[in-house]
Amino acid sequence: MESLTFSQLKKNLKKDTSDFKKIKLAVLGNCATQLLSQALRGYAYELRIALDVFDADYDQLEPQTLNPESELFQFEPDYILIQLCSEKLYLEFCDLPPAEQETFADKIIARIQEYWRRIEAKTKAPILQFDFVEFDDSVFGNFGLKTKKSFVYQIRRLNMLFSETAALDKQAFPIALNSLSAQIGRNAFYDPQLFYIAKMPIQVELLPQVVRRVFDTVEALAGHFRKCVVLDLDNTLWGGVVGDDGIEGIRIGELKDGKIYSDLQRYFKELRNRGILLAVCSKNEHAAAIQPFHEHPEMILREDDFVMFVSNWEDKASNIRHIRETLNIGMDSIVFIDDNPFERNAVRSQIADLTVPELPPEPEKYLDFLRKANLFETVSVSGEDAKRTQQYREEAQRTESAATFASYDEYLQSLEMVAEAKPFDLFHFARIAQLTQRSNQFNLRTIRYTESDIKRISEDDHFITLYFTLKDKFGDHGLISVVVLEKRDNGTLFINEFLMSCRVLKRGMEEFIINKIVSTAKENGFTLVEGEYIKTQKNAMVAQLYTQHGFTDCGNGIFHADPNTYIFTPNFIKENRS
Amino acid sequence: MMDRTEVFKRLNEIFQDIFDDEELVVTDETCADDVDDWDSLRHITLISAVEKAFGMKFAMKEVLEMENVGEMADILVERATK
């Protein structure tokens, strides 16, 4: 997937996409976007997406966003992509009187905010916008870096303002074009001939890489992103083979090329702190494999950074399947990192959905390679992310403890579970939106909401919102379920959103939540609770959920329950009503 | 110096590919007016594909002033590196 050419993408335009998921994307820019649009459509094919593109002619941002009846809004896009190229902004900069050049970045950001405001008033479509490719017109030389009068000062400031503005806007998602340009190099990225002939600020052959970044975010918004890295140890997290070289012989930190591996460990530690799960999968004696994590003073990663530590002599594909099953996440959300091409190929050939980056042969290039690959895109961060490893580790302890009880009920009782049900509040908007984006399996309708949607729903009287938390004697699961109930006119309460983290499956939590939904309906005088199951590739586990809990199957994925006669399902969870 | 017949043979393949027409045969005199869809956008894609295939870059003046395929071939005979 990494090395697609523009002409390969172009060939995809003629292929049949009738079986693919349909997505509508509007593209707007201050430069020529036709080839960008072609590349987007061609790349979409690779992701099994049938992309319908509305490509506004260039410089149409103003009229298309201003007029509520414009083609842009009539198109009803699912996503909107905006490209404002710096080369065109530069012309505008030059036309300003010198005094106004000093506030150029503020002027542009105000305009962007206005575009976003107009778009957001008309559509909930996420706005994807490239950040600004920085270049120096060198009018002030080095001094340009310390004077507001220079273009380089203003374009850098614009990027900072752009990030700050996007941070406050839940519907806007920047696409990192500037870092891509820097990685590739300005001379390769920008071809003056192409710009002067065709108003294109990006070299044609780089469009596949550019649109990949766009789809990284589109896919993440659709709930497809990676959650876990499975790591080899010998010659991946340290140099050498611990079983042969011993703990003092492995290269990490000051020893020879050990700094390469220290920096790789730092990278994975940062990912872990951001909420990506780390697991070990290594062919080793367990005692030898774990020893460096306990005893080596220069190791950055420690045992408790890993959610699972699998070191044995089994084949790696079986071990990775075991890790996936224990963590209960999709195979397509796992990345496997191994220095050994043989292992990579073996695993790749056995597990289709797993991501296995083809690392370069030189270890010193691993880190740069992984950074460029952008494997860990996300569309939200929340306070819970950093706790994720801890929560999954506690889960492993629960699994061990469960084995000591005679019956499963006895085990559930021993957990001393306490749950809370609360309406959405400001402090949890981010986490709630994130769960609607992340949950695939226990998700009845798989409706993805952004943070701004969640805020709007929580303020809308037509909805009753509930989030659920669960804790037990081993630890706190945090916010693990989201329910949105929609008040319909005829005394019906419709379950608009119902999802739960698979971490807490089979504890009685699903019973607890359904009981709460029905009792909420009853307390508010509704005479019917209506649930819907919308089938996706991943949510088969809840196909029968409503019928298993006493709802009547009305066909077409619709299920009904009468709150006044509903028989509540017993469970071992206490409600904390404080 | 590259053989002109060879240049034409390869150019023809690129044209067929870019214009998605397996029947297309270009000659010295073929120009934008003769080929369906040969607009400015297609021209850019064509130039980019030819540059890549022949391992060379056209000057901007050449891109703008080329009148027909024959002129393009003349430049390639001179400057192609692969």
Image (cartoon, rainbow, N blue to C red):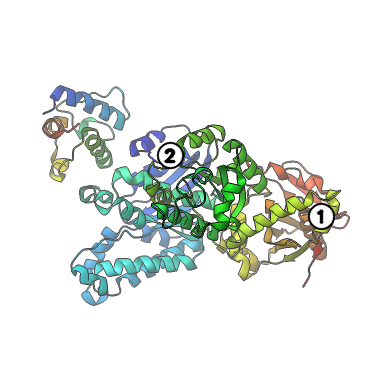
Residue A534, image quadrant: top right
Residue A245, numbered label = none
Residue at (31% x, 26% y) in the render: B21
Residue A412, numbered label = 1
Q: Is A93 located above or below residue A275 in the figure?
A: below
Farthest-out residue, bottom:
A99
**Residue A497 visible from this viewpoint:** no
Helix, strand or loop at label 2? It is loop
Q: Give the CA distance from mark 2 to mark 1.
A: 46 Å
Q: Residue under mark 2: which chain is it in?
A: A
Of the pair A240 and A369, the residue shown nearer to us: A240
Considering only order in the chain, which callout, 1 or 2, is on the residue closer to the N terminus? 2
Q: Is residue B68 left or right of residue A439?
A: left
Indicate which label's residue lies in the foreground, 2 or 1: 1
Q: Where residue A538 sits: x, y (%)?
A: 64, 42
Q: Is residue A543 left or right of residue A1?
A: right
Q: Quadrant of the C terminus of chain A?
A: bottom right
Q: Quadrant of the N terminus of chain A?
A: top left
Residue at (26% x, 54% y) in the render: A186
**What kind of residue is marked 1?**
Leu
Residue with the mark numbered 2: A1
> Is disc 1 on the same chain as disc 2?
yes
Q: Are marks 2 and 1 in contact (CB under 8 Å)?
A: no
Q: Where residue A453 sits: x, y (%)?
A: 58, 61
Of the pair A369 and A103, the residue shown nearer to us: A369
Judge the density around disc 2: few (<14), some (14-19), many (≥20) Cα neighbours within 10 Å: few
Judge the density around disc 1: few (<14), some (14-19), many (≥20) Cα neighbours within 10 Å: many
**What kind of residue is marked 2?**
Met
Q: Where residue A570 sits: x, y (%)?
A: 86, 55
Q: Residue under mark 1: which chain is it in?
A: A
Of the pair A48 and A119, the residue shown nearer to us: A48
